[in-house]
Image (cartoon, rainbow, N blue to C red):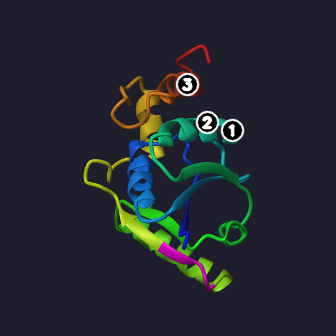
Amino acid sequence: MNRIAVYPGTFDPVTFGHLDIIRRGALLVDRLVVAVAVNTEKQFLFTTQERIRFLEEAVSPFPGVEVCQMDGLLVNFVRELGADFVLRGLRAVSDFEYEFQMAGMNRKLSPEVETIFLVSGEETMFLSSRLVKEIAGMGGDVSRFTPACVIPELGRRMMARLGRGSG
């Protein structure tokens, strides 16, 4: 039986925390689909295609992992793929409260969709895309937090956004 999981997120940008969840999640299923969410209410630093490109490069060493764009409701996407699970990472209690609420809503919308939570490793539990962007915007070294393919463009965009570079 082919077990499929979907790991949704905005990945703006992808961090080593995301990659830790992807690597470990891929060991639990035959196929892990990393779903890059399109959210029209959120302003992204990177376009959907850029986020997909960064992720594809970063997950290339992980067998059974693919990256694609996701529009609309997660439960509809999961159904369309024939996936068995939604995979979510938890860093802190605040993550749990939000993710627990989302898992409950997803279950109401689609009772067959199960959510699996993976707790972040202690090396990455403090990481968030927001913090990585803040550090990059202040000229800090983010090489310990995000893949090398992201770093040059992240630095340029954050410095430009904050009016510190030539954009």
Image vertical order of residue 16 relative to residue 77, above or below: above
**Residue 8, percent from left and from top:** 57, 58
Circles 2 and 1 in contact, beta carbons < 8 Å = yes
Segment colored magenta:
111-115
Report whether 26 appears left or right of 126: right
State the SS at label 2.
Answer: helix
Q: CA distance from mark 2 to mark 1?
A: 6 Å
State the SS at label 1.
Answer: helix
Image vertical order of residue 115 relative to residue 40, above or below: below
Q: Which residue, given by chain and number where applicable, does mark 3 sit on?
A: 153
Circles 2 and 3 in contact, beta carbons < 8 Å = no
Q: Which residue, given by chain and number where applicable, does mark 1 sit on?
A: 49
Judge depth for marks 2 and 3 and give the one in front. Answer: 2
Going by the numbered disc 2, the residue's amino acid type is Arg
Quadrant for the C terminus, please. Answer: top right
Going by the numbered disc 3, the residue's amino acid type is Glu
**Residue 6 vs residue 60, the one in the foreground:** 60
Residue 58 part of the magenta-drawn span: no
**Residue at image x 54%, y 65%?**
5
Q: Is residue 45 visible?
A: no
Q: CA distance from mark 2 to mark 3?
A: 12 Å
Q: Residue furthest left?
A: 122
